[in-house]
Amino acid sequence: MQPLDLLERDEEAVRWGRRAVEGLRRALGEDDPETLYAWHLLLEPLAQLGSEQEFDDESAALIAACERALPPDHLTTLLARHSHAYGLTELGRYEEAESLARRVLEGRIRVQDPDFPLALSALSLSALSLSALSLSALSLSALSLSALIALELGRADEAIAIFREVAERRERVLGPRHPFVVEDRERLAQAVAGR
């Protein structure tokens, strides 16, 4: 599923992902961690397709299943919440994404080292949500130019600081040429340029 998603072949990713999840449900059961892990991989391509109702239904069902079957800070539960938060950003629902991304980040830090790559990914998602929230507030507002600048400075600085921290910490752990580090530097540059 992920290679198809990375190739932006989201319809195929969803189709194959559903087949995989159904097969795992039959073989391992609905609440097995492997089944739930495969299920979380459906969320991102569903959001990228813009299937908002389907995304909401799948996310709610998946998170309920994770909470029923797994401990609250189980890695699969955290992945499901992370994918849900990322999908919310894809759908432009930044306020929901930002609060969920913070929850994911807190869980990751409790379970893993703050410099662990997935904890840094959660930190990056939190920054992305904040940055997008700031930018969407600007695009939807009919405020004067000076109010727009003040609003932009109000949340963009926080997002920039988080992007900078993520990029620096990831670079220490993964090295300067790792794709995550390159992407973080690009996001930082975009956030700074967008001020």
Image: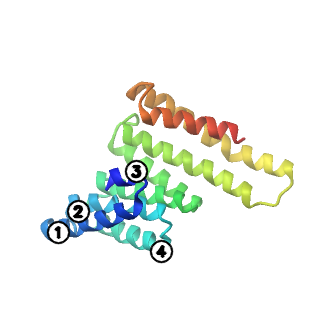
* SS label for mark 3: loop
Three-letter amino acid code at disc 4?
Gln
Image quarter (top left, top right, bottom left or bottom right) of the N terminus: bottom left
Is residue 88 rendered to the left or right of residue 78?
Answer: right
- Residue 101 appears in the figure: yes
Residues at badges 4 and 3 in contact (C-beta under 8 Å)?
A: no
Residue at label 4? 53
> What residue is shown at x 62% (from left), y 47% (from top)?
131
The nearer-to-camera label among 3 and 1 is 3
Which residue carries the number 1 mark?
29
Crowd class of label 1 (few under 14; some 14 to 19; many from 20; radius 10 Å): some
Gap between marks 2 and 3 measured at Cα: 23 Å
Query: Of the residues shown, which amino acid type is indicated by label 1?
Result: Gly
Question: What label does residue 35 carry, if any?
Answer: 2
Residue at the image point whose x is 35% and y is 64% from the top: 14
Rounded to the nearest whole Å, what is the CA distance between mark 1 and mark 2?
Answer: 7 Å
Q: Which mark is residue 59?
A: none
Q: Amino acid at mark 3?
A: Leu
Query: Could you tell whether 62 is left or right of 99 in the image?
Result: left
On screen, 21 above or below 172? Answer: below
Q: Give the crowd class for mark 3: few <14, some 14-19, many >=20 residues within 10 Å.
A: few
Q: Residue at x 41, y 54 (%)?
A: 82
Image disc number at residue 7: 3
In this picture, residue 145 sits left or right of residue 108: right
Give percent across and percent down for residue 73: 32, 53
- What secondary structure is found at the residue carrying circle 2? helix
